[in-house]
Amino acid sequence: MQDDYDLSKLNQKDKRVNSRNKGNTFERKIAKMLNDRFGVKEFNRSPGSGAYATTHNLPEHLKIHGDLITPKDFKFCIECKKGYNKENIYSLLDYSSDFWGFIEQCEKDSEKSYKVPLVLYQQDRRAILAITRANNFEQSIPHIRIKKEHEYDIYNLNDILGASTVSWFL
């Protein structure tokens, strides 16, 4: 009996996903969704994905906070997070989890930009969640309320995209 089996593929490792590319793609996807929803072309990725404002000494009027450039009267400072599959429902109860770290990062950027924090978070093959301070959208939209220093509402992004435009702008 002759052995014709090629076992070399068993030792190959799966291709690693480039997390930077994954995040950049997610930011572009969110910008396109918001541009389509509001009929504008002003939503774009920030240079350096939000880090540019904190790593360069720019005049205040040129600083960009968050992961997306938004229209001038847009109410929210947006932080986009894709992946992080180790996070789960229990992460909401663990204040040292990455999940709460995302909210804290967005809180800091939103304070600098005088806007409301909005974290857009998606695990692989799941719906996009929108986490923002409580009471920014109609309470009839399904949501979960969580609390640390502030109260936050967690929505399915698709649900709040249908909310009144007034909810999104100052």
Image (cartoon, rainbow, N blue to C red):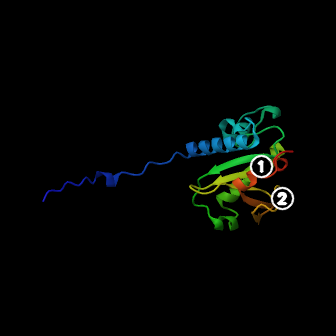
Q: Using the rendered view, name the quadrant where residue 42 is placed.
A: top right
Judging by the rendered image, the residue that carries numbered circle 2 is 135
Type of amino acid at the residue the image marks with label 1 = Lys
Residue at the image position 14 percent from the left and 56 percent from the top: 2
Establish if 71 lies above or below 102: above
Residue at the image position 75 percent from the left and 39 percent from the top: 39
Type of amino acid at the residue the image marks with label 2 = Asn
Q: Position of residue 110 (x, y in %)?
A: 79, 47
Q: Position of residue 154 (x, y in %)?
A: 73, 60
In the image, taking residue 124 as reference, residue 141 lies left or right, namely: right
In front of the other: 95 or 162: 162
Judging by the rendered image, the residue that carries numbered circle 1 is 108
In front of the other: 1 or 139: 139
Establish if 80 lies above or below 45: below
**Which disc, if any, is residue 82?**
none
Mark 2: secondary structure: loop
Residue at the image position 84 percent from the left and 40 percent from the top: 73
